[in-house]
Image (cartoon, rainbow, N blue to C red):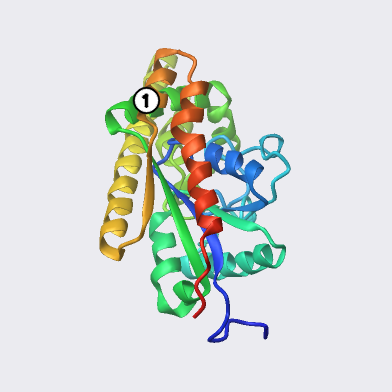
Amino acid sequence: MASGFSTMTEKKKILFIMGATGTGKTKLSINLGIQFPSEIINSDKIQVYKGLDIVTNKIPESEQCSIPHHMLGIINDPNYDFTVNEFCKKMVETLDVIVENGHLPIIVGGSNSYLQVLVDDPIYAFGLKYNCCFIWVDVSLSVLFPYLDKRVNEMVEAGLIDEIRDFFVPGADCTMGIRRAIGVPELQRYFEIENDEDFDEAHKEKILEESITEMKENTCILAENQLIKIDNMVNRFGWKVHKIDSTKVFEAVLKGEDYQHLYQEIVIKPSIEIVKSFLEEATNEI
């Protein structure tokens, strides 16, 4: 068969893992990457930047299970504006490499507006090149919100404040680059007064608590907006999406119960079956 995508070129297969922040997309991608010869591509527009690993929830190399990861921490300049067009171009280049390796690309991340452009903009001819499988990991907001609060607390305990302090630049623009990450704008006010002797420690502590509360609120707003975007994309573009409801798993987590069995039964096993069926399907030729 001739190289390139001709009129008789077989479509390649791609797996997308979607969902709001905190719903376990990364964890699922690792579990599926272990089961199938895969490589994972980050599609979070903030995680493409180097640094602020706690704030941006990057998966550490020690947890990547030797699965190749792409587009993770690749931009050194914290102020660089990584546009949607650059994202799509880099994504297509990376997909070509993974397909050439004979592996399944797993695209995982929460930047849904970027993914929409990638899949639906005719300039990238995505539908002509690829067959796509979408898994949407969903958690009821009434359960997800308290979990996100809990996760912010855990991030603070893990050193989030020190991490942002080291990154703090007075007067920095928090509307571009990695400084858009939730946590950086919210803590800006605290770091501006942290070493100011005109403010007593009680006032500083109050500002810090308010900043953390604002982080939690903005994280929940982000999750809600992400769900709205996913729902709109599914309905508008008619994507065939497999929805996995992980609410019971997260309820168990919040109660401090053992959730591993639930996670296997509710999330992992169905997802493996979805991917198996997808890979076994006859690939259309165009």
* Horizontal and vertical percent position of residue 95: 61, 65
Dividing the picture into quarters, in which one does residue 22 lie? top left
- Of residues 207 and 114, the one nearer the viewer is 114
- Evaluate whether residue 199 shows in this view: no
> Residue drawn 67% across and 35% down?
63
- Of residues 40 and 110, the one nearer the viewer is 40
In the image, residue 154 sits, relative to residue 98, either above or below, namely above
* Horizontal and vertical percent position of residue 151: 46, 26
Horizontal placement of 110 versus 27: left or right?
left
- Of residues 262 and 196, the one nearer the viewer is 262
* Horizontal and vertical percent position of residue 165: 56, 33
> Residue drawn 46% across and 39% down?
270
> Residue drawn 42% across and 17% down?
200
> Residue drawn 45% across and 13% down?
256
Q: Which residue is mark 1?
A: 248
Density class for disc 1 (Cα within 10 Å; few <14, some 14-19, many ≥20) is: some
Helix, strand or loop for disc 1: helix
The amino acid pointed to by label 1 is Lys
* Horizontal and vertical percent position of residue 39: 65, 53
Look at the image and tell me in which quarter the N terminus lies. Answer: bottom right
- Evaluate whether residue 182 shows in this view: yes
Dividing the picture into quarters, in which one does residue 168 lie? top right
In the image, residue 38 sits, relative to residue 169, either above or below, namely below
Dividing the picture into quarters, in which one does residue 253 lie? top left
Number of dots carrying numbers? 1
